[in-house]
Amino acid sequence: MSGVSRRSVLKTSGAFVIASSLGRLWAQDSALESALSPTLDSVTGLPLLKLPEGFTYRSFSWSGDSMTDGATTPVKHDGMASFPTDGDGVMLIRNHEEVVGTKIGGEGVPIYDDFTIPPGTEGVPDGFPGFGGGVTAVSYAPNRPPVTTPLLAGTAMNCAGGSTTWGSWLTCEEIVLRASRIGAKDHGYVFEVPSVGRASGNPIVDMGLFRHEAAALDPKTGIVYLTEDNSSNSGFYRYLPRNKQPKNGALEEGGRLEMLRVRGTSNADLRKPSRGDEYEIDWVSIEDPNHDPEDFSSDHFGGNVVGTGKSGPYLQGEELGGARFARGEGAWFHGDSIYWVDTSGGAAGAGAIWIYKPADSLLRSFYVSPDEAVVDAPDNITILDNGLVLACEDGGGLTTESGEIVRGTKLIAINKHGQSIEVGENNIMIDKPIEGRPAINPGDYRRSEWAGATFSPDDKTLFVNIQTPGITFAITGPWDSVGTG
């Protein structure tokens, strides 16, 4: 029986009912029922999200809102982490997954690459305004206005990342650009951004030149685990820093990059796991983490600078028998293990979550989506202290054959038994301009992805983004009871 999913042809509303029923039937051993309803935002009064009973939320730091330096909050909110501050507040550090555009922030913001091409330049008639990706911070407390500050500019396609135990954020570029060929700087790296203090703007080159997604630090060893999102040729890596001191800048001093390999199986293909699959693994060394990718193509820059095909680190790891995954995404350290996502993993291609336990050198498939109707393309993840996994969908929602949106993207909880439950749905439909937010165009944004899920230190508030039109939310409710039914 073929799967009924967001990509299926749904000709009538009746077909959607059938699709939903089949999705529940196929997933009866892995899914729990939930009831979501439109819930009003306490700030705008709009029903931007669908949530379970007992949950409330507040929107803030929209794209276009003013920042502390007078510039406007950038677009495409993505990966994010929260850090405790004095009192009842938190500091959120947030990525922006933009490549080309206006530089983030005004004067005084650390800039990695300020390369531009003026309009009318031969070969690039429209010019190149610069690299628009980067990082912002939001100071948030329940009873005070949120304050947004730019932290890093001049990077490209900052997607996910990961936090450190010493209060910094590792922001990852999900692109490969050998832009030094045209006088700019190369892109495809990881940067450290402190929650307190100024970012250096220096890439951690030894973490590799590839389409980075997420980073997860093992606090016991100081090793950083890295995911790669490069179509069907993605590896899983770890970075062993020379300086293991838990402080800003130590990771920038360099280290050794390695790629995961299954013991006894050269080039193991792990793109279609079943739940519970286990593998003993080891690691192979990547001698040149800054190696060129398989090929280059031309794009905005008037030169062959855009990396295509297999990445340089993947090519080296492949020669030594490294394992192959579909598309690495979010990663999180919890307990004694690294949880990480293969967004296209599993037989249905709808996503899988792996657990790697360093002490045992054991890799295990924790969750595999049986169909896109159940969980579709999990991306960023975070984990509550009780082990509940929160996954952000990036599957585009459910649509009819004519393109009508039936259901928005979802926020999914997965409990320790591998059962999934819907705990949020994107319901952003803006039918007229919002007062005070001229940068937000009316439109139906329900297909936009959830991103950057991260809990407050007390686990009572979930902070999460909808990438477009670019909104951050604080969602409160009985999180500790989710998934116990």
Image (spheres, helix red, strand yellow):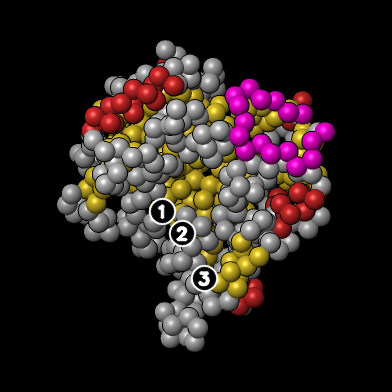
Q: Estimate how packed mark 1 is, as few (under 14), some (14 to 19) or many (20 or more) residues with alpha carbons within 10 Å.
A: many
Q: Residue 340's quadrant in the figure? A: top right
Which element type, helix, strand or loop, lies under badge 3? loop
Q: Position of residue 206 (x, y in %)?
A: 73, 55
Q: Which residue is mark 3?
A: 299
Q: Nearer the viewer, residue 272 or 74?
A: 272
Q: Quadrant of the C terminus?
A: top left
Q: Estimate how packed mark 2 is, as few (under 14), some (14 to 19) or many (20 or more) residues with alpha carbons within 10 Å.
A: many
Q: Which residue is mark 2?
A: 98
Is-magenta flag for residue 147?
A: no
Give amino acid for label 3.
Asp
Asked if the residues shown at circle 2 and circle 1 are in contact, with their CB atoms under 8 angstroms apart, the answer is: yes
Give amino acid for label 2.
Glu
Q: Estimate how packed mark 3 is, as few (under 14), some (14 to 19) or many (20 or more) residues with alpha carbons within 10 Å.
A: few
Is-magenta flag for residue 268?
A: yes
Determine the residue positioned at 53% across, 61% down.
Answer: 156
The majority secondary structure of the magenta stretch comes to loop
Determine the residue positioned at 47% across, 75% down.
Answer: 128
Which element type, helix, strand or loop, lies under badge 1? loop
Instruction: Give how far apart the Cα atoms at labels 2 and 1 are.
Output: 6 Å
Instruction: Give how far apart the Cα atoms at labels 3 and 1 are.
Output: 20 Å
Instruction: Give how far apart the Cα atoms at labels 3 and 2 are.
Output: 15 Å
Q: Residue 60's quadrant in the figure? A: top left
Q: Which residue is mark 1?
A: 76
Asked if the residues shown at circle 3 and circle 2 are in contact, with their CB atoms under 8 angstroms apart, the answer is: no
Mark whose residue sits in front, 3 or 2:
3
Stretch in magenta: 264-280
